[in-house]
Image: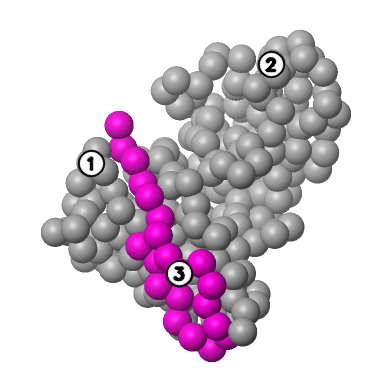
Amino acid sequence: QVQLQESGPGLVKPSETLSLTCTISGGSVRSYNWVWIRQSPGKRLECLGFAYDIDNTNFSPSLKSRVSTSVDESANQFSLKLTSVTAADTALYFCARIKGTTGTTRFDYWGQGTPVTVSS
Amino acid sequence: DIQLTQSPSFLSASVGDRVTITCRASQGINTDLAWYQQKPGKAPELLLFAASTLQRGVPSRFSGSGSGTEFTLTITSLQPEDFATFYCQQVNSFPPTFGPGTTVDV
């Protein structure tokens, strides 16, 4: 049974960099593709950054200049960095596993989410 | 980005009711659509993908249909554990996007 666990600082000051980590158990980070998603109060779910086949990454166009992702195979982790944060980045952040190919893609396992507040 | 709308936004229902939620895409997405259920304080859980394929372990009272721009999620007999918010997600075009959600409550 795959389990994902997000970890992060909880509180970040405006203009600083948010760093989150997703630790994967019950499966290898190498074997699948991964995504970070956030959910702001009253707003819809939003995909932020992706990792495909460990070496390939992609990002939401709206956040592309501020988002990066990385995979640490030795630690079996998938990470997110979001720079120059503002109050608008306050949200519940999830990591999830991507399964399937064209036409059958889905996010089949999710972490429980980690809340992030941007405030001075 | 492909925009998704859902109707209704809120649905009042009772145990045993048949419930239907509609998701519409701003452009055709074939059957590249998934449905998720989210309960308060929890992560979304996958219900269906490819518009109509039931995720392993999901009860058969959940079903999905549609293609192109209009999709439906149906719960044939609502159970107490089904009260939640439901989201559709398109995976046809990058980035994947979600609908605004439909809350099913008493």
Give the CA separation, mark 2 to mark 1.
32 Å
In this picture, is B20 found above or below A118? above
Determine whether the residue tagged by mark 3 lies in a helix, strand or loop: loop
- Host chain of mark 3: A
Examine the image and state in which quarter residue A79 appears: bottom left
- Quadrant of the snapshot with the N terminus of chain A: top left
Outermost bottom residue: A15
Give the x, y percent position of residue B26: 68, 54
Checking the image for residue B79, the label placed there is 2
Q: Looking at the image, which residue is at 74% across and 40% down?
A: B102
Neighbour class for label 2 at 10 Å: few (<14), some, many (≥20)?
few
Q: Amino acid at mark 3?
A: Pro
The answer to whether the residue labelled 3 contacts the one labelled 1, judged by CB atoms less than 8 Å apart, is no
The answer to whether the residue labelled 3 contacts the one labelled 2, judged by CB atoms less than 8 Å apart, is no
Which residue range is magenta in the image? A1-21
Examine the image and state in which quarter residue B71 appears: top right
Checking the image for residue A110, the label placed there is none
Q: Which residue is mark 3?
A: A9
Q: Which residue is mark 1?
A: A27
In this picture, is A66 found above or below B78? below
Q: Looking at the image, which residue is at 30% across and 53% down?
A: A23
Closer-to-camera residue (A88/B25): A88
